Image (cartoon, rainbow, N blue to C red):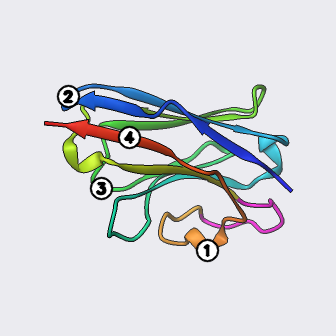
Amino acid sequence: QVQLVETGGGSVQAGGSLRLSCTASLYTRRSYCMGWYRQAPGKEREGVAAIKTGGRSTAYADSVKGRFTISLDNNKNTLYLQMNSLKPEDTAMYYCAADDGTVAWSCTLARRWEYDYWGQGTQVTVSS
């Protein structure tokens, strides 16, 4: 069982930046994909960014392209999400996710059911 712990959330004004971290209890190389998702009150959970742990290819939601960057440090078993130029609509609970590495897949953001492990979330609030 893999445990994921997110940190780095907080409250910022629009235009500000935050960096989220997700530390895994086991080697991140065990997973094929890792990703960040978010969920605002009354809305469905949506994909923000994903990364293949091996080839490091990435995917982003259109709403965050050019503002957010996902990265992975396998030596620290930590996934990051650098968030710049934050907007009030980015306000949500942000979750880290990882699969169990048994199946190779495309790391497509829409396929969130492919992830086996989820963190407890970290809150990001952006004020205007």
Residue 91 pos. (x, y %): 30, 47
Question: Which residue is denoted by mark 1 in the rendering?
Answer: 113
Question: Which residue is denoted by mark 2 in the rendering?
Answer: 15
Residue 118 pos. (x, y %): 65, 57
Give the number of the disc on residue 30.
none
Provide the secondary structure element on which disc 3 rests.
loop
Assess disc 4: are there few (<14), some (14-19) or many (≥20) residues with their C-alpha within 10 Å of its C-alpha.
many
Provide the secondary structure element on which disc 1 rests.
helix
Provide the secondary structure element on which disc 2 rests.
loop
Describe residue 34's horizontal placement relative to residue 65 as left or right: right
Of the residues shown, which amino acid type is indicated by label 2?
Answer: Gly
Q: Nearer the viewer, mark 2 or mark 4?
A: 4
Of residues 91 and 64, the one nearer the viewer is: 91
Of the image marks 4 and 1, the number of the one nearer the N terminus: 1
Of the image marks 1 and 3, the number of the one nearer the N terminus: 3
Quick check: can you spot residue 32?
yes
Residue 26 pos. (x, y %): 85, 42
Question: Which residue is denoted by mark 4 in the rendering?
Answer: 124
Provide the secondary structure element on which disc 4 rests.
strand
Of the image marks 2 and 4, the number of the one nearer the N terminus: 2
Question: Which residue is denoted by mark 3 in the rendering?
Answer: 62
Cβ atoms at labels 2 and 3 below 8 Å apart: no
Write the start and end of the magenta stretch as one range: 99-106
Q: Nearer the viewer, mark 4 or mark 3?
A: 4
Of residues 106 and 1, the one nearer the viewer is: 1
